[in-house]
Image: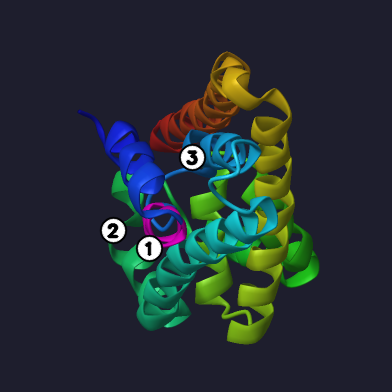
Amino acid sequence: MDMVELATDAIADYGYWALGVFLVILAPEALMPFAGFLAHEGLLNLWLSILVGSLGGTTGSTLIYLLARRAGEERMRDLVRRRGRWVLVRESDLDLVLGVYERKGYWIVAGGRLIPTVRSLVSIPAGLLPMSFGRFVGLTFLGTFIWNSFLGLAGYTLGAQWSALEPYLGVYGALVTATVLLVVGIFVVRRLLAQGVKGR
């Protein structure tokens, strides 16, 4: 039995608290359609499920934010100065990311909740800046609530056919992951080529 099967069994047996706990660590795509199905069957309240699931997801992101905030920008800069060359990261890269967050951080934190893989990463620069705790939690909850509403309503609408969503969500997740890997790959190749030119 994998983690998702364990979670769906627990949600079916124990309801809201299991949904909230498992969404601290699992992606909403895996559980919210199932919660919508349970609401369709009258076993859960749809909007309470969405609320509880959003609180769980927000908690998970907030833990990452707090870890990044504890590390702090100066410690991260020191790490990049000392070890960054081994992972092809420069201090200017950190400046770029934090600069974008200072200008567009609200949109990135809220909008990032709708994107698999990215949703965990957006918490790190927000913690390093740091974005204020209340603002981060509010924006994270807003984005999470919007995405969970879509997933929960889709599961509710499909009812017993809720699992039909899985292939589409899988394709969406795969496309996002492939895009992230492509961007990282382009970054690595360009940085290696730049270092090769400098080394001549």
Name the kind of residue labelled 2 in the image: Arg
- Mark 2, Cα crowd under 10 Å, few <14 / some 14-19 / many 20+, is few
Which quadrant is the C terminus positioned in?
top left
Residue 145, given in percent of the width and then of the height, sits at: 69, 57
Task: Give the spatial CA distance, label 1 vs label 2.
Answer: 5 Å
Residue nearest the viewer, comparing 85 with 40:
40
Is 7 rendered above or below residue 108?
above
- Mark 1, Cα crowd under 10 Å, few <14 / some 14-19 / many 20+, is many
Q: Are marks 1 and 2 in contact (CB under 8 Å)?
A: yes
| Residues drawn in magenta | 16-22
Magenta portion: prevailing SS class: helix
Name the kind of residue labelled 3 in the image: Leu
Is 49 rendered above or below residue 39?
below
Q: How many marks?
A: 3
* Label 3: element kind: helix
Question: Where does label 2 land, which residue?
Answer: 83
Q: Outermost residue, front direction?
A: 42
In which image quadrant can residue 107 be found?
bottom right
Question: Where does label 3 land, which residue?
Answer: 31
Residue 36, given in percent of the width and then of the height, sits at: 61, 39
